[in-house]
Amino acid sequence: MLQKRVAAVCLLAGSLLSTPAFAEIRIAVAGPMEGQFAAFGEQMLAGAAQAVADVNAAGGVNGEELLLEAVDDGCDADKAVAVANQLIGKGVVFVAGHFCFSASVAASEVYANAGIVQISPATTLPKFTDERPGEGVFRLAPRDDQQAEAAGRLLASDYGVERIALLHDKTAYGKGLVDAVKAVMNSLGTNESLSLGFDAGEDDYRGLVSQLALQNVGVVYLGGYHPEAGLIRLEMTRQGLDAVLISGDALMTEEFWSVAGPAGEGTLLTYPEIPRQMETAQKAVAALEEAGLPAERYALTTYAAIQAWAQAANSAGSTVLNAVSKELGTGSFDTVLGNVSFDHKGDAGVPAYVWYEWRDGAPQRK
């Protein structure tokens, strides 16, 4: 199933069109290609295929054509390790991925030991680069502590008099984000009324919302993903709980509104500047849309990851990890996200988080 989707996306994006080359360099995109987070994987795959097509059309990397592999990690650490080892066997030298923190961290150990450069276009938890296992691990996503700083300050300044509930879905992303928001909020003198974890993947959150209603909360900060956030927001409306829902960047998807519907009106979220609105992204956006492919955030951050790696490999004259990592750590790269550079941890200087609000079925800048 996945291989058919890869072939279809590559054909649409044009990445199977050959340019003069004497060899092939295998790179990969890794993420949740199936399951509840498949919408994000679809974006990553589309961006990767288009980037490979464009790099090859411009002459490839060091005169060699790129060949794209795609693997599904299911947002699962064990599966990520398994597919990472598969990529080693295929001779992959670079991976744009993974999406979920648990998968990114688990796979990074494999890549570091195998001499494979990894740039995650989506992983935001600080630990990913704070504790990276090698010099070849990078990210093109803002850190959660930057997101938490914005959310914690808003809760303290605008909602400090309200009863605040902190919810998380027990995932590394969700709990990590809530813990960081709590630390910022508490440091500013605002405390939560309750903090609860819930199980992701459920279809009934009546009991959870009842607890919120009994506590008469006025604000709910939720660390988690759009399926659960949509259901919880819908249940809040059904139970007449008039509380503001605030969350993170995972709610920047139309799938949230498809679950919550009009109940999602007024939901706030932190998110970086929308990549597709950047001037530097317009050519790639047009190509993706012409091919009928998504041109949203993770399509463009994945595209940019491949651009940065390709430019670094060209500058190094090599695809060997040490040489490419040195270039990535010291150079600057022209990408669809603008000019990008990486610091000593492997974090990129990407746009800061700003506030959006769901209004009339779409997230709008506040």
Image: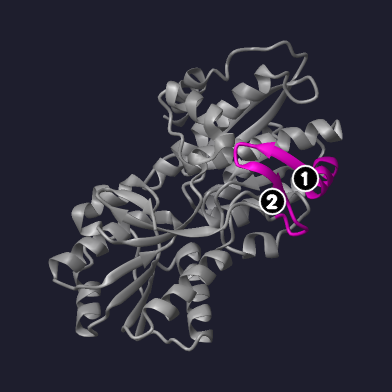
Task: Return the mark for residue 138.
Answer: 2
- Secondary element under disc 2, as helix, strand or loop, is strand
Q: Quadrant of the N terminus?
A: top left
Determine if residue 54 is in view.
yes
Q: Is residue 172 above or below residue 3?
A: below
Numbered mark located on residue 51 in the image:
none
Of residues 126 and 163, the one drawn nearer to the viewer in this rendering: 163
Residue 98 x/y as whole percent: 57, 47
Q: Which amino acid type is marked by label 1? A: Leu
Residue under the image location 62 percent in, 49 percent down: 140
Between marks 2 and 1, how big is the CA–CA gap?
9 Å
Label 2 neighbour load within 10 Å: few <14, some 14-19, many 20+? many
Q: Which of the 4 image quarters holds residue 162? A: bottom left
The residue that disc 1 covers is 328
Q: Is residue 38 above or below residue 123?
A: above
Residue 244 position within the rendered picture, expressed as x and y whole percent measured from the top left: 29, 70
Q: Is residue 104 left or right of residue 5?
A: right
How packed is label 1: few (under 14 Cα within 10 Å), some, or many (20 or more)? many
Indicate the position of residue 359 as horizontal and vertical percent values: 28, 53
Residue range highlighted in magenta: 322-346
Residue drawn 21% across and 63% down? Answer: 204
